[in-house]
Amino acid sequence: MQTKWKRMLACFLAMSMMASAGSIVVNSEGDKDAAGDKPAASDKEETGESTVSDDFVARTEQQVLDSMIVAAENDKLIFYVWDYENATEDAPVEDIFALKNKETGYIWWSSPFNAGGDPNATPTLRKELASALTIEYGDPKSRSTSYVRSGDPSRCAFSYSSITDGVKVTYNFRKAGIQIPVEYTLKEDYLSVRINTEKITEKNTSEKLLTSIKLLTAFGAGDSEAEGYFVVPDGSGARINFNNGKTNASVYAQRVYGKDITAVPTTKGAVTEQVYLPMYGIVRDDNALMVVADKGDSNAQINAAVSGQSKSSYNLCNFQFILRSTDTFYMGGDTTPLTVFESGSIKTKEIAVRYYPVADTAGTTDYVDVAAAYRNYLTTDGGVTPKVQPNASDLYVDIYGGVEKSTNILGIPVTLKTAMTDFDQTREIISSLKDRGVDDMVVALNNWTNAGIAGKVDYKAKAAGVLGGKSDFQDLTQYLSDNGIAYYPTVNNKKFYSGQGFFAFTDTAIRVSGSYSRIVSYERAFGTPDSFKDTISLLSPSNFSEIYSDLTDNYSKAGITGVSIGEMTSLLYGDYGKKAISRDDMKNIMTDSLSGMQKGVGSVLADTANAYALPYVDHVTNVPLSSSGFDVIDEDLPLYQLVMHGVLPYATTAINGSADSERLLLQAIATGSNLHFDLLHEETSELKDTDFDIYYYAHYANWLDTAAQEYKLASTVTGAVSDQTIVDYIQQDDVITTTYANGTVTTVNLKTGQITCNGTSYALSDYVEEGGLLS
């Protein structure tokens, strides 16, 4: 740890951190929610009428191919670019590419080659459909942000040069003074599109500041007659059908790995799921395209819009890369918010997107094939090593230890550390489950240290005295080890109060606006900040390397063989003060820290996991089985489960925390998920006015029998396929049929609770007693 005198000295310098040097302030014309997402940009280019020019002549696919040349070819793919060497003034170069799957003959186009004839699009949007790049830049003088498109010859010129297995195209956005070189390279089974951001030139960042890039905006676009859908990794996954008629719904636009939480919203937003995987899929014409952000994923956003909703006739899905973060704040009594752009150079060093054509020989390509393609990417190039054991089935249990609770002593209100499940009671809960037939468990021990209970930075691995102290903790861990139960003492160092060598003045993350990032509690009725609860600081990512290195050492010295860092495997945010930590920097810090923990402690449990954490974790829990349910979404998909099954063991969100626990259980069985329960020892009435009041459902005595019975059912049905990938998944109304790689087939009826596995039938009612789950 840094010595205290250094930290105290830094306290005196804290006020200098209130403003980020060189920040550019403009009036916000976008989203007033300062949740860290990119604000909506104004588009000051002409809109014009949607009338198609009399000069437009529709072209066939072959006619367009005749104007193109083969830039690269291998055994599987052909990559076409415009015949730039023979272009003329009458037949200029078009910003369009084509990728052909030689096995099926299907061609994926980077842009609709007849976009100029779209009767529903304005001239500006027709140019966007014909563009490989759409950039956004901030203009401090006009106090706004604007888009410019590479397919607009009046604003962008581009030049080609040959490179090995592809071409480099340099886009010169003249009006913005921004030049971007892009390398298009054909690999064995995908097209790579790469931007080295250090090669981007900005003429004058005080006047025009590059804030985002939409890459290949219309790759794989389907028109209003096309049949197909998008696969987006929202929560468990979701399907957005082409031409679904939801033109009044908001377009899909979600940050990969979640919002940047340094910018605290003024009101609590809607409860949504998160994008954990930096990929999406397009399925059409018995073919699919799996698209993955291989580099720059920490600053990627997935956009999707259907015909009409996109203000054109086309269904579109693409990646947008946020190169500079923004924040909003109010000055004095002004009612108009000001927007601040992140200053300095672009922090994302590289953007790279892979486009994988996918098709099965039977002509039945669907989202399962998209999931398989991404799983193959993870296990070949993504650093993920399969860790699932055969014939394995675990019950995941979260135990909640101590919490601070207000009480009166001699009429004086005081806050005391209070045990809700001490170490002896934890052993009682686990042994009770074993007595009921649950032999295999993965146990997370939450709030088990004094620092964790008090909300301070937690790294010392010292058991809380209120829970029984060091002796009782050692007795518990010995019992768990002797019985072969994996256990993970948990820390969660997202938010903190001063103490343990860390101080709010020096170790709080700084917003882009220059203010401290404080996490607030919101009133449940109105979603506004609760003035009766203290704010708490967001810990700067600059501290994580030091904290997790010390944590690893302390766990190792204590003989602890498993560790969980709570929700930190699914969070990504920056520190935009003088420490200048970007989301990309935090991602690298976290992967290095997780790697060190896995090597130094032995095993890592993730409480949900973003894709970058997957190579370094051994279990993933709290995996959602639904999407955010946005209006534009047509169907939830178990995309995350399809990707992960047979690779890493994972569990659902807490069964007993669900409003429809029966359905969640059946969905878990259908997707091969392990079950998960939240448990604590004290009566839930004791949780009132504590941070544990959200676990009102978790009193252990109410759930022991149910958890054991459900575990027995789930392990009987799915235990034998733990190490098998899912090769088919079909849901028809309430009936889900799942096929595994070894031929095992399960059928689950969500309405009746009937389950079959290779012809053997099971009934949920046979495993859950009257008065239990079905009551």
Image: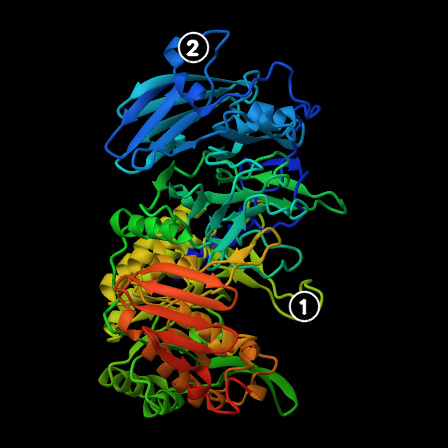
Query: Hey, what amino acid is under mark 2?
Result: Ala
Tell me if mark 2 has few (under 14), some (14-19) or many (20+) residues whose alpha carbon lies within 10 angstroms of its own.
few
Examine the rendered structure and indicate whether residue 761 appears above or below residue 201. Answer: below
Give the residue at x 48% y 23%.
60
Q: Is residue 695 above or below residue 565?
A: below
Label 2: element kind: loop
- Residue 495 horizontal/vertical position (percent): 49, 63
Colour pattern of the rendering: rainbow
- Is residue 756 at all visible to an observer of this figure? yes
**Badge 2 or badge 1: first in the primary sequence:** 2
Asked where in the image residue 224 lies, by quadrant, the reply is: top right
Direction from residue 277 to residue 254 in the image, left or right: right
Q: Is residue 437 left or right of residue 317?
A: left
* Count of marks, rendered view: 2
Q: For residue 357, which numbered disc appears in the image?
A: none
Estimate the spatial distance between the alpha carbons at disc 2 and disc 1, rounded to whole Å.
63 Å
> The C terminus lies in which quarter of the figure?
bottom right
Which residue is labeled 1 in the image? 523
Q: Quadrant of residue 529?
A: bottom right
User: Percent x, y for residue 231?
Assistant: 47, 49
Please tell me which residue lies in front, 32 or 155: 155
Quarter of the figure that contains the N terminus: bottom left
Q: Is residue 581 visible?
A: no
Q: Position of residue 195 (x, y in %)?
A: 39, 31
Query: Can you give x and y, in whole percent of width and height, for residue 756 in the image?
Result: 38, 75
Looking at the rendered structure, the kind of residue marked 1 is: Glu
Of the pair 308 and 150, the residue shown nearer to us: 308
In the structure shown, which secondary structural element does the residue marked by tag 1 occupy? Answer: loop
Q: Which residue is mark 2?
A: 87
Q: Residue at x 66, y 44 (%)?
A: 247
